[in-house]
Image (tube, coloured by chain):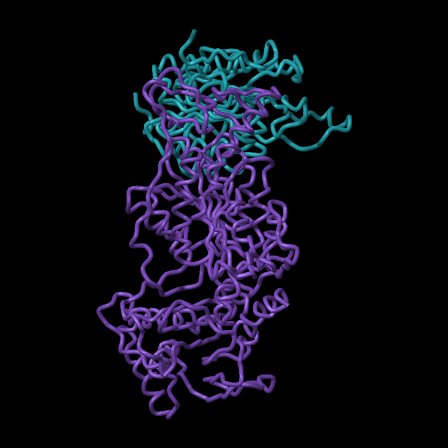
Chain colours: A purple, B cyan
Amino acid sequence: MRKEITIGAVGAGGDGVIVLGNILQELAGNQGYFGITSRAYGAQIRGGGSSIKTKIDSEHLSLAEDFLDVLICFNWQKYFEFERELRIGEKTIIFCEADPPSSVQSGKFFRVSFGNGQNKNIVALGFLKNMIGLSDPDPRNPSQRILKNNLPSFMAGEKLFQEGNFSKLELERPRNPVPKITIQGNEAVSRAIIDSGCRFGTGYPITPSTEIMEFLRKKLPQLGGQFIQGASENEAIYILYGASLAGKKVVVPTSLPGLSRMMEAIGLFSATEVPLVIIDVQRCGPSTGIPTKTEQADLQTVIYGSGDASRVVLAPFDFESCYQITAQAFNIAEQFQLPVIVLSDQWLGQTVASCNDFTLIKPEIISRLKPGENEKNNYLRYRLSENNISPMASFGDEGFVYQTTGLTHDERGRPASSQYLQQKMHEKIWKKLEPLKQRDDLVKVFGNPEAEIGIITWGSSGMFVRDTVRKMGMEEYIKVCVPELIFPLPEKSIARFLKGVKKSLVVEMNYTGQFYHFLRSRLNLPRKTKLYCRAGGSPFTNEELSQAIEEAIR
Amino acid sequence: MNVYRTDEKPIWCPGCGLYGEIGSFVKALEELAIPNYLVSFVTGIGCSARAAGYANVYAVNGTHGESLPIAEGVKLANPELTVIDQGGDGDIWAIGAGHVPHAVRKNLDITLITCDNQVYALTKGQRSPTTAFFEDEEAAGGEPDQPLDPLHDMLAFMSTIKSGFVAQGISTKISHLAELIKKAIIYKGFSYVHVQTPCVTYNDPEWIKFKKEKAVYLEDGKEIILPNGEKIIYDSSDRRMALKITEVPLKERPYYGVIYQEKRRLIN
């Protein structure tokens, strides 16, 4: 009996590998297991190979091991596209339809025929179910309808395992057998959009954010809201500008190429103080890059793009954080009247997790400040106030007609070109953000607070770093800081984390160390601070991170 | 003071055609008696876009070429509002042209006004996509690009959805232009008003004079003679007849009036 298992599967497009991963995980999740399934596709979005790596854990949510326990290989040629994600070790048990090429030197392989039909993935599913000792699927569960319709294939797989006399890799019963929800980061974000009261979205299809757009397209009209697919990212974002002026909470999901097109609009939202939420699901760049693979290289673009435009940048680091941070994004956008960019990434967005249902606790909802009756017929849209936040009327409100412009403007919103107002309005759009820097709740700290080694990381790298520290058994000696609020940076909170830290390490997945340089521009890092960064293209492994940590503490 | 005008003094040159254009716009609103808070006026960048600061309605002076989607967003979010988008020939037909066919096919109840002076005037005299092509200019080393014809192109886009409203006026004829803008606002669906807007700084005075004096005014039921000699009794609900009008180049003969309107969308 074992507590956890890491299973990989690879095949050509059409072999149904992704479906195999999804159903396997849902099956385990319904029985109370935690799980994570990451997907990787070939260079082409359609037509290439595809692979999944599924971790099932009876105790808690944990990331997959570097080396697989089990590999189902439908196609060796495609395997080599994903060698790095699906590593074969000495103990890996491989079930394959053809003998592995001679370059595969490790692992123990068994030739198994999963059949020639379209259902070989379901056959493999039945096979795996018996191998790891899951209970029978519950046919009443709607998510397992696909099994009900393919029951003969599933049972053929179960039989295949039994008759082959293979040894079992049986999992312990889940510690807490409450069924888990099975959710992608993109879905967690989407559900938070709905639960935050947003009812107006636009989008333009772009991998790996498209799932969010599809969710909104389906869900918003059901709730009396609207979703508009733009003819371009420009159209998508500027429709939101009009809708937000007319009083709607608005959102658009995108990725770097689309985000780059939206940059001018971000300046307009900021200068004219209009609430907006952008969900940027980062992928490998620059330019088209590798659309299907993960990276964290959009940070500088969103922090520094569009001149001195004030904005807020948030970065969720795990699935629950995807939900909570997206909800925070709407509240911050509404309260401070500015663009908020949520930096997710392909790994977080498209990886499927089975975990406790974090969507049960609904977020608090904050809406923009509206002008009072006393301001009627005497309304200054950009009135300079103590907290620099001016009440915002919606287009159509009686008695508050105003004009707004991307030009520097006065309190009424009329164009102005004096140095005085240029300075004053900058102070307004920047100083209003000051209270945000005190949001300690948006800086997550893990591990022993007394530890003298500190790792600072952001986004999904936070999950990988924590997982590696735990697997290294170093939680007592290493603490980890993951700011979810990246800009404006809660400097005091991070300085507190660094107090007493003698050696530190910054970890992120981009070539130039964008977060590291940003941190250094804002606060003093310990003299012995190292940086581990590399271009994206595959998730971090425990091996590379533990090496980086060992070097940093040497 | 007029309820639809702010107290802001326009930055336009003395004698600019835009004074007449905003005058027509305000007259149309007055005559339709739409409360000013129910009007949204969206513009981009350029001389004509500055009008957003002079109209006392909810107004946006946004970014270059992006006013149409902003107007669409306002209308989608609050269908009760009367939404008018205004831009120049550069704003709408160069940098913003990609938005035009999509605005047509969405067919929201908004009005697009292009103030066409055939020049980038705010940046001091560069060629625009509607700058007229004259053989003598090319001979003198000018750019050989043919201008696009917004009326003809708009009618073509509208042909694909078999709907729409297209009119052309000149800003020096305020009452006539105000009537066109009123009809466009009343029309239920996407409507387009093209306004010949003289630029006193960069247009050749002869060209302005030509556009004023050689124009033919279209009226339903009135006979007109096309430059090829063909006589027609004008009917603005006849798209093929409208195409005959828009096929005549501006420099040959300007036509002012409602060129095309889909009848079933008109509500009195």
Q: Quadrant of residue B259?
A: top left
Above or below residue A262? Residue B135 is above
Q: Observer-nearest residue: A56 or B152?
A: A56
Above or below residue A93? Residue A189 is above
Residue under the point 36% across and 34% down: B77
Q: Give the percent coordinates (x, y) of residue A414.
A: 51, 20
Q: Quadrant of the N terminus of chain A?
A: bottom left
> Is residue B128 in view?
yes
Give left or right: position of B124 versus A29.
Answer: right
Give left or right: position of A483 versus A157.
Answer: right
Q: Give the percent coordinates (x, y) of residue A462.
A: 50, 59
Q: Give the percent coordinates (x, y) of residue A270.
A: 51, 34
Residue under the point 47% across and 62% down: A447
Above or below residue B19? Residue B52 is below
Residue most toward the top?
B1
> Is residue B245 in view?
no
Residue under the point 54% across and 15% down: B18
Q: Observer-nearest residue: B131 or A423?
A: A423
Q: Quadrant of the C terminus of chain A?
A: bottom right
Above or below residue A21? Residue B139 is above
Q: Quadrant of residue A173?
A: bottom left
Q: How many marks?
A: 0
Q: Give the percent coordinates (x, y) of residue A53.
A: 46, 72
Residue most toward the left?
A140
